[in-house]
Structures are given as C-alpha cells and as structure tokens.
Image (cartoon, rainbow, N blue to C red):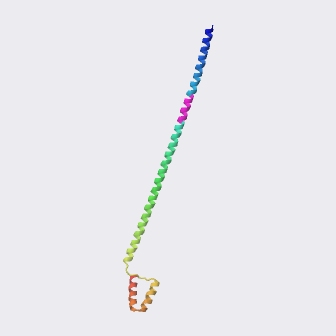
Amino acid sequence: MAPVIWLHAAVEMNLNLREEAQRERQQILESIASNRQLELDETLNRRAQNSAYRCDLLGQIDYNRRQKSRADEEQKRLEKCQRDAEAEYWKKVEHLRGKPVVEKLHPVRRGLFQSQSATGSRQNSAAARAEALF
C-alpha cells in the first residue's frame, strides 16, 4: 500500500504544482495585458502631446507670418507716404520755380529795402534786384 500513498501524494503534489503554475501563468498574462494597456495609454498620450505641440508650432508659424505680413504692409504704407510727400514737395518746388517774382515781401524785408532806397541809387538798384528775386 505504500506505493499507492506515494503515488497519491505525487499526483496531489503534481496537481498543486499545476495549479500554482496556472496561477503564475494567469498573473503573468494579467501583467502582460496591464503592461500592454500602459504602453497603449503612453503611446496615445505621447501622440496627443505631439499633436498639441505640432498645433502650437503651426500656430506660432502662422502668427509669425501674419506679423511679418503686417510689418511689410506697414513698411509699404510708410514708403508710399514718403513717396507721396516727396512728390508733393517737388510739385511745390516746381510751382515756385515757375513763379520767378514774389508778389509779397516779408514786412522785415520791406522795411529793409525802403531804408536802403533812401541811402543811395546804387544800393537802391541792389535792393530792387533783390526784391525782384524774392
């Protein structure tokens, strides 16, 4: 009868080992599933962060382009204003060049020319010429 007890004990020990191996296997499978889920979550999180970062960069690029465009437009507007002002200046210069005789003398000059006319004909002729120029 000893061999039967020994066989029964060996079978029972084998069953215990199988159950323990089955539990360990189940724990390993659960750990693998948990790790896969963690990796999937991390991957999705990383993708979301990368996508947000990409959107931020594209937004910054767009903002920089708009700022550069505004600066370029402002520069063009200033250059146009400067060209218009210069054209107006040259228009006035040409208008004044076309008008050789000044109709009105400044009151100070008028008094100066009147006082010089009393001093002599030579100075008077110089004053007349100066008056004609101004």
Principal secondary structure, stretch drawn in magenta: helix
User: What's the magenta region?
Assistant: 30-40
Of the pair 11 and 64, the residue shown nearer to us? 11
Residue 51 horizontal/vertical position (percent): 50, 43
- Residue at 61%, 12% (x, y): give it: 8
- Residue at 61%, 11% (x, y): give it: 6
Residue 91 horizontal/vertical position (percent): 39, 72
| Quadrant housing residue 34 | top right
Numbered marks: total: 0
Residue 73 horizontal/vertical position (percent): 44, 59
In the image as oriented, which residue stretches furthest toward the top?
Answer: 1
The relative height of residue 9 versus residue 111 in the rendered view (above or below) is above
Specify the quadrant that holds the C terminus.
bottom left
Of the pair 99 and 38, the residue shown nearer to us? 38
The relative height of residue 28 versus residue 109 in the rendered view (above or below) is above
Of the pair 17 and 108, the residue shown nearer to us? 17
Say whether residue 111 is magenta.
Answer: no
The relative height of residue 55 versus residue 29 in the rendered view (above or below) is below
| Quadrant housing residue 42 | top right
Residue 13 horizontal/vertical position (percent): 61, 17
- Residue at 47%, 84% (x, y): give it: 108
Specify the quadrant that holds the N terminus.
top right
